[in-house]
Image: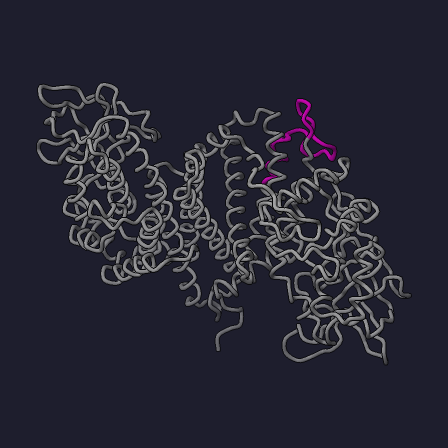
Amino acid sequence: MTLLDDTQTMLRDSVQHFHTRHPAPARVRRLRDRPVPFDRAVWLAIAEAGWLGVLVPEALGGLGLGAAETALIASELGRGLAPEPYVASGVLVVQALVHLAADADHAAKVRPLLDTVTAGTTLAALAWQEEAGALDLATTRLQALRHGDGWQLQGAVKRFVPLASAADGFLVYALADTTPALFWVATGTDGPRVRSTRTVDGLDFGELAFDGLTLPADAMLARGPAVRHAVAQAIELARLASAFELVGVAEHALQTTVAYTTQRVQFGKPIASFQVLQHRMVDMWMHCQLARASAENALLDWTAPADEATRLQSLRAARARTGSTALMVGKAAIHLHGGMGIADETDIGLCLKRALALSAWLGNPLWQRGQFLDALHQTGRVRQAEGGEAIAPHDDATVGELPDAQFRRVLAEWIAAHYPTEKRFMKKRAFYNDISDWYQALSKKGWLAPSWPKSHGGMGLSPAKQVIYAEEMARHGCARIPDHGLALGKLLLMHGTPEQLNHHLPRVLNGEIMWCQGYSEPDAGSDLANLRTRAEREGDELIVNGQKIWTTLGSGADWMFALVRTSKIEGAKQRGITFLLIDLKTPGVKVRPIVNLKGEGEFSEVFFDNVRVPVANVVGRIDDGWNVANSFLREERIFFGTPRQCESALTQLDRLADASGAMAQADFRDRYAQLVLDVRDLKAAFERFMGLLRSGEELGPDVSYLKVWGTETYQRIADELVQLAGDHGGQMDDVVVNGIATDVMGQYLDSRMSPIFGGSNEIQRNILAKQILGLPSGNPRP
């Protein structure tokens, strides 16, 4: 969540206090039984709080704030389930009037109406849409024809007008001799015929039939291109505000569900302690995080000097994500409430109903995705590399001191010039022999160890630049070098002895020794604290017996850093574990390769039979190895959430879709648009964590959701690749369609493995459930 300034904090607090004084659920139930579901006294209270004047400049009598404050109010009103038409009238109507009131040609007619709307004494609605799915002003058919000294409206009805039954009048968008015009049409006997339809959330929208309605000359508020611009901008800002309102609804549903499941007891335990329910709530939380990130990204593009195409793309993406999220979270919340979820006395049902009504208004998620994809195709799917300012003088040792954008450019240019072309996008995990030339080139450049300090031969990069380094390597198709030695080096720098540093770090840098990691065991995969490989002390040696499995690049390694059990200590299983460096050439060590799904021996199992290891090879203290191994894992988790893997797979999907003509299929287009948005939202979330790193903050446990969302998005893209390959979907060779080759099966099989590496996604969900949502353990209540 973006940090709030003092004004925004006061606004947020005022909305929350409003909910305390005027609880929305009781009001919703009361209003839905009325012919007109609107409480004018509450609306006046909203006006008195100043919220309707947020978008109005101070010169026009408003607060002179902007889109950020509007979004904040909308989000908090959504969180409180308020039924009032803040976005429909306080944003959509006000924004249209503000644009025109600032124009000297229209101010005289517009300003009096704007004043009464912001004071809450006039409830106005904007009537612009004429047919279902006609969500662009270009589809307008309503004509304003000269009629004596006035005007007559003919040719079309206006539909989907929010709370038309309660409105005092309507801003009607029409064409006067093909020129956009805006009319004020009051309700009453001389007004339009209004036919209202109830919405599922207890409110309504209306259909306005004009039937040749005649209006006086002064009913026209404005005419000309400025009218179209004002109304179009108002509609887009309303979409942005409604995205934040949807986020608020979703977050309310999640919060309510967490509270309910924590209190609800079954089988002697709160149901929130059941892992299957915890994982569902974590998924709800992840979607809420992505929805807020997407909405805030759209807000940033709205308020920043972005081009119009970028603004609209961000808006479509945000509305698609927030609408889908509010519906998904609302449905899950009802299910997790069990029988109470379908009882009207429980407020959770109001969340889903509000989400249904809001997500359908101004274009549902399906429409938003389609519009987003159209805009994406017009601007190009892949954004070209940015230029930027001139690069400051530097040498290899000081490149890490450049600003991030310049650092990225320097790194990218060097990689493009020096990485072997024939080894780009290798289809297997590289052993040292496969990539030794590149390893040595990086070493000679001094760019092999981005996280190590310069004093020990590294680049001394900040965490943010380390991520940029990894991203550029991936973007250019560089094979991942055998990097366990680099990870060990960072640990040794934190916990190793001078002798360990002096012996091992130079040998990592020159490629003399390759390392592997010995954590997982047959009965201790994700649950590392359950490991059984033991090390018994005999004098100055530890005698190691046991087995490690799923050891990446084990058959090509010379040494292993491993976790072994040295003591059986009562209490936490993590105690009594030691971090040990083991020479794999020691007698008693046996390495057996394991062939993976792709037919490669990337993994191994390693057996230890009375293997003698010097005590001097212990890193840190005996029995304290758990703290050593976990000392920097949280920071490292961000690398598992980088969008680059998904972007690479999406590029493959692009190529295959273009070659096969799949974009002409409506069902594929929507699935493709959803995948593009999934990757886009992953990037937005990833950038938020990168911002924390840049500011020097430590990453919290919430970074785990990047790994979950990133790897599972990768799986969804790979699944689509297989489906699109059709009859070729089972072949190991590249799929060639119209001369375009795509690595379908390589992506698919890789995607099956990625959610398991680095702590399975189920374990990541457990972390999020406990440390973010605060869900209880499975222990029965006393």
Q: Residue at x 72, y 57 (%)?
A: 458
Nearer the observer, 482 or 543 = 482
Left or right side of 767 for 194: left
Residue 202 is situated, as x and y percent measured from the top left of the image, at: 26, 47
Numbered-mark total: 0
Q: Residue at x 24, y 40 (%)?
A: 98
Residue 7 is situated, as x and y percent measured from the top left of the image, at: 31, 57
Q: Is residue 677 visible?
A: yes
Nearer the observer, 330 or 97 = 97
Q: Residue at x 22, y 18 (%)?
A: 177
11 magenta-colored: no
Q: Is residue 520 visible?
A: no
Quadrant containing the N terminus is bottom left
Left or right side of 74 for 209: left
Region rendered in magenta: 717-741
738 magenta-colored: yes
Nearer the observer, 735 or 448 = 448
Residue 647 is situated, as x and y percent measured from the top left of the image, at: 60, 40
